[in-house]
Every structure is written in structure tokens, then in C-alpha cells.
Amino acid sequence: MTQTKSIDKTVFMIIGSLFLVALVAIWVMNLHKVESTELQGQVAPDFTLTLFDQYGTEPIRLSDLRGQVVVINFWASWCVECYKEADLLQKASVEYQAKGVVFIGIDHLDTDKPALAYLAQYGITYPNGVDLGDKISQAYAITGVPETFFIDKEGNIAHVQIGPIEETTLYDLLDKLIAQSAKAGT
């Protein structure tokens, strides 16, 4: 009987040790996880976005937009907070289009029917598509939706907005990025 207790104790110790090693490994992996705001000032990860049909048949590649200010908004139809900024983003996309600003919407973890209804409800005219396989969201290390990235003309992430953006903040950021471009002579 003491031999059985000894084996039970050894098995328990081995399982306990493996569990602790697994916990430490998970903790270490999370130490190296980058959050979206840590990408500010870095080159924006390139991507190719397949658009919803109403926005055309050609996918958008971010690197093709170099030389323009780009606003990338991650959203979803199920996101209550996304509804708070949808009208504002559409309005700003129209107002800033002539100033060389391109808006792109990326639908995150959604299904087509509700996503298309969301776009129709807010009359969204700027290009939108689905993040197939969640690859773009992972490259940008988004923490949720809505999340908006402001890319300068050189292709760098100038600002990351987590949560819905307010009108004053949006317009101030856009004006600042346009002014920076004008100072640089581009």
C-alpha cells in the first residue's frame, strides 16, 4: 500500500509540474504579445482586402495607397459601439476625399447579411470588405471593435483609436496628417 501511495504522489507531482510549466509558458507568450497602440510610429502592415461586391471587384492593397492619408476602421455589425461612429466616419470620408484621405472599413468576425445591412443602414460609400481568416486584425493586433488606425502618407501608423472616435478628435487627426504632408512637400 505504501508503494501505491508513493506512485500516486509521483504521478501527482509530475502532473502538477506539467501544469505549472504550461502556466509559465502561457504567461511568457503573453509578455511578447503586441497591442495595437504599440504599433504607433511603425510602418503599417500591408494587406490585401477583398471588398464586398458593391464596392467593386478589385481588392484593395494598402501599399498601393502610399502617398495618401489612410483611415482603417475595424468594425462589426454586432458591435454596439461601432454604431456610434458609423455616420461620422461616412461624413468624414466624403468631406476629406478631395484632400487625399482614403477610408477603408474592415468587417471583423461577422457574417455577410448583417454586415451588408449595417453598411446599407449608414449609407457607407467608402470601400469595405471582410477580414478573411482574421489575418488583417491579427497583423494590426486589434483589441476589439471599433478600432481605427490613421496611416500617414509615408505608410506609418500615426495614431490608433480604440473605441468609437469623437468628431473633434477625428477631424483634428485628419487635419494634422494633411498639414504634415503639406509641410513635407507631398
Image (cartoon, helix red, strand yellow):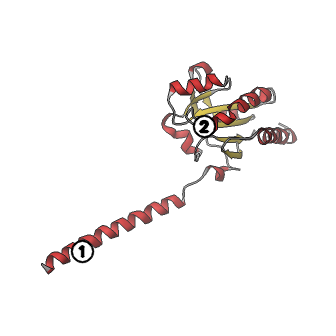
Quarter of the image for residue 185 reads: top right
* Quarter of image, res 101: top right
Q: Amino acid at mark 2?
A: Val
Look at the numbered disc 1 and give the secondary structure of its residue.
helix
**137 left or right of 65 in image:** left
Q: Is residue 175 left or right of residue 73?
A: right
The residue carrying mark 1 is 10
Q: Is residue 51 visible?
A: no
Q: Earlier in the sequence, mark 2 or mark 1?
A: 1
Name the residue furthest left.
1
Amino acid carrying label 1: it is Thr
- Looking at the image, residue 1 sits to the left or right of residue 117; the answer is left
In space, the residues marked 2 and 1 are separated at their CA atoms by 52 Å
Determine whether label 2 and label 1 are within 8 Å by CB: no
Which mark's residue is nearer the viewer, 2 or 1?
A: 2
Name the residue: 60% across, 45% down: 140
Task: Relative to 15, say whether 69 is above or below.
Answer: above
Residue 80's disc is 2
91 to 151, vertically: above or below: above
